[in-house]
Amino acid sequence: MNTKSSIFLSGGFRSDWQSKLLERYSDRFQFFNPREHNIAEPHLYASWDIHYVRKCDIIFAYMEASNPSGFGLIFEIGMAYALNKTIILVDERSEVDATFAKYFKIAHQPSGNVFKTLEEAFQFLDTFI
């Protein structure tokens, strides 16, 4: 039985970055996409996120330059690290905000695979195929 590896999409909703992954990789991976769950209550969507971080093989975390905080992303990276998941982090914001970069470096340590652009992260994700 050939099953697809699964990816949890962690990151902001200011752009439509998730659709770029889905367009490029939907035939190769299964996705858990919080953008699609349509849950409004924080305690319910947090439970959904936690469930699927546990279930995924890879967490793809995108800290886009326009993300105002990254608190959820940091939580999901920490949880994925504790569960020994593969973590791919794209950190755009640190390139444009030195103060943010100083504090966000804590997310780089558990990630191991840190990229400055989506395209660089996509090239790395290609190696999993």
Image: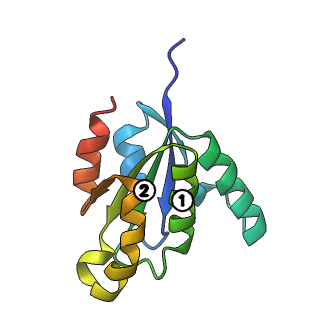
Q: Residue at x 39, y 80 (%)?
A: 103
Q: Position of residue 61 (x, y in %)?
A: 43, 58
Residue 101 placement, left or right of 45: left
Which residue is under mark 1?
Answer: 78
Q: Are marks 2 and 1 in contact (CB under 8 Å)?
A: yes
Q: Position of residue 84 (x, y in %)?
A: 52, 43
User: Which amino acid type is shown beneath numbered disc 2?
Assistant: Pro
**In the image, is residue 65 above or below residue 19?**
below
**Residue 100 got which mark?**
none
Indicate the quadrant containing the C terminus: top left, top right, bottom left or bottom right: top left
* Kind of element beneath mark 2: helix
Quarter where residue 115 is shown: bottom left
Image mark count: 2
Q: Residue at x 57, y 50 (%)?
A: 82
Which residue is under mark 2?
Answer: 110
User: Which amino acid type is shown beneath numbered disc 1?
Assistant: Gly
Quarter where residue 64 is shown: bottom left
* Kind of element beneath mark 1: helix
Label 1 neighbourhood size at 10 Å, few (<14), some (14-19), many (20+)? Answer: some
Q: Residue at x 36, y 83 (%)?
A: 100
Question: Residues under labels 2 and 1: Cα distance?
Answer: 7 Å
Q: Residue at x 50, y 58 (%)?
A: 77
Label 2 neighbourhood size at 10 Å, few (<14), some (14-19), many (20+)? Answer: some
- Of the residues under marks 2 and 1, which one precedes in the sequence? 1
Indicate the quadrant containing the N terminus: top left, top right, bottom left or bottom right: top right
